[in-house]
Amino acid sequence: MISIKEWKWEKVKPKDKKEETLCCPYCNVKVRATSDTRIFDVDTGAIKYQIFKCPECYMPITIGLDGIIIPPSQFLPFEDIQHLPVKIEKMYRECRKSFSSTCYYSVIMVARTMIMHIAADLGATSNLKFVEYIDYLENEGYISRHNRTWVDKIRKLGNQYIHELDEATEEEAKLAIVFIKHLLINVYELPQMAQ
């Protein structure tokens, strides 16, 4: 037999109100929001969710005990980049979606794969070793020897997660996507803006 728990809503007393700094999933503005309602389990009295109101767009933002915001934001982290080839734009969007879904392993793997696709799009032949794609980007001037350390960092992170049973971190995923973002801007967006 399935047991159905009863949850109730209640207004929060002024002394019990909570404040959170968060990015609103509706308007994508970083705000300081105050909870005015909460949802609790009738049987145990345990608070399950706090409901905040965005001071910018006035939409309700629900935060569970685990800190997860409901609904998840439909705005992707990191900015859009103009003038990308369709395949590379799709991969960059996948990187951003993975990051917003806290799929950090996926961010690193897609970022690593993007380096090969970027090099191939810029003229490298296919079926090269990964390091040869990096060499191509450096030899053709798309990355400098200073940026090479960033590319090697993504390569090493990718190798680490392919061959070891480690868990990717948010910091590592952010590092990977920030480099890819700058590489895409330098290779695709800035040359088009200069014309």
Image: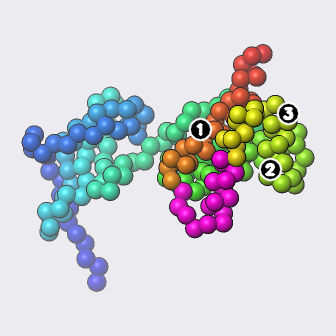
Q: Mark 3: few, some, or many residues within 10 Å (few <14, many ≥20)?
A: few
Name the residue beneath numbered marker 1: 178
Q: Which residue is drawn at 14% across and 50% down?
A: 10
**Residue 4 within the magenta-colored segment of the rendering:** no
**Is 24 left, or right, of 87 in this rendering?**
left
Residue 158 falls inside the magenta stretch? yes
Distance of label 1 from label 2 (alpha carbons): 20 Å
Q: How dense is the environment of label 1, judged by Cα within 10 Å: few (below 14), some, or many (20 and up)?
A: some
From the viewer's perspective, is residue 4 above or below residue 25? below
- Residue 79 left/right relative to 63: right
Kind of residue at badge 1: Val
Mark whose residue sits in front, 1 or 2: 2
Q: Quadrant of residue 164?
A: bottom right
Residue 169, label in figure:
none
Residue drawn where x is 78% and y is 32% of the image? 142
| Residue under label 2 | 131
Q: Which of marks 1 and 3 is in front?
A: 3
Q: How far apart are marks 1 and 3 (CA)?
A: 22 Å
160 or 57, which is in the foreground? 160
Q: Which of marks 3 and 2 is nearer the N terminus?
A: 2
Q: Residue 141 is drawn in which quadrant?
A: top right
Residue placed at 83% from the left, 54% from the top?
129
Residue named by callout 3: 140
Secondary structure beneath label 2: helix
Residue 100 point in image, percent of width and height: 50, 47
Residue 136 image offset from top left, x and y in percent: 85, 41
Type of the residue with mark 3 = Glu
Q: Position of residue 171 (x, y in %)?
A: 51, 47
Identify the residue shown where x is 53% and y is 61%. Answer: 167
Instruction: First in sequence, mark 1 or 3: give its number.
Output: 3
Q: Earlier in the sequence, mark 1 or mark 2?
A: 2
Image x and y of residue 24, in percent: 37, 37
